[in-house]
Image: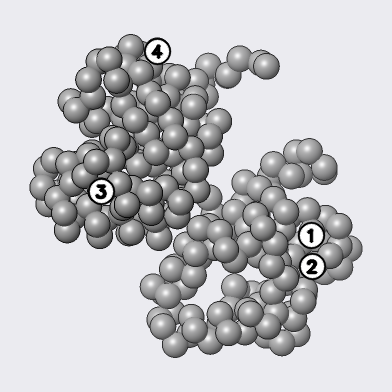
Amino acid sequence: MKSAHPFLAGIATLAGALIFASAVSRAQSADGIVVYNAQHASLTQAWADGFTKETGIKITLRNGGDTELGNQIVQEGVASPADVFLTENSPAMVLVDAAACSLRWRRIPWPRCLRRSGQLTAGGSALPHGARCLPTNKTKLTEGQLPKSLLDLADPGWKGRWAASPTGADFQAIVSALLEIKGEAATAAWLKAMKENVKPYRGNGTAMKAVNAGEVDGAVIYHYYYFGDQAKTG
């Protein structure tokens, strides 16, 4: 495996420091810091390695899904070994936030709790995350046929023509944004139409492959899955 680019290694160290530093005061030197990680495992491992190299403090990663780890923390309660909960989407954060703030847990991270009690670990990525996009199959759609917005995908003319990964936390975040911007009635109507129109896939990468294969005209995914796919497939 090639070594990381120096610039990326520097970013990894900086991000790791920002994420893990506030847990240091509670970390015993023998045990280090326990991170429940719902981010990409390889990226977080780079952060952890950079942080350990700079500080000598051990990082133990427990990798899993957003909802899985969020529920685990809630079930563990004050006995949770987690010093930091690292996730990218709001549903799991809100789940942990509600439990942590109501019980005044001292070891569970979420910035709003930190401001309330001054006792909780706050962690966050210093790097921009994903924008939502609609990569399309150019053999099936022209530029003039593209939807003007996400809401257009509710039109009956899009039935069976677009993909998403509706059970993933990524898509839950999209719906949360729609709810915040357009309101409950518009979001409910869009979801009802989506149920009729969408072809569901498990994971953004699988939905992207469906676009390449011509199974669908387009897919609602995070943008970096598109760029990663194009780097491999063109």
Of residue 221 and residue 121, the one placed in the foreground of this image is: 121
- Figure check: 212 above or below 197: above
Q: Amino acid at mark 3?
A: Gly
Question: Looking at the rendered structure, which numbered label has been put on residue 53?
Answer: 4
The mark that comes first in sequence, 1 or 4, is 4
161 displayed left or right of 148: right
Between the residue at mark 2 and the residue at mark 1, the CA separation in whole angstroms equals 6 Å
Quadrant position of residue 211: bottom right
Which residue is located at x 43 percent, y 19 percent?
A: 50
Q: Amino acid at mark 2?
A: Asp
Between the residue at mark 3 and the residue at mark 4, the CA separation in whole angstroms equals 31 Å
Quadrant position of residue 47: top left
Q: Could you tell me which secondary element the residue under label 4 belongs to? A: helix
160 displayed left or right of 80: right
The mark that comes first in sequence, 3 or 4, is 4
Q: Are marks 2 and 3 in contact (CB under 8 Å)?
A: no
Question: Looking at the rendered structure, which numbered label has been put on residue 217?
Answer: 2
Determine which residue is flagged by label 3.
77
Which residue is located at x 29 percent, y 35 percent?
A: 81
Determine which residue is flagged by label 1.
211
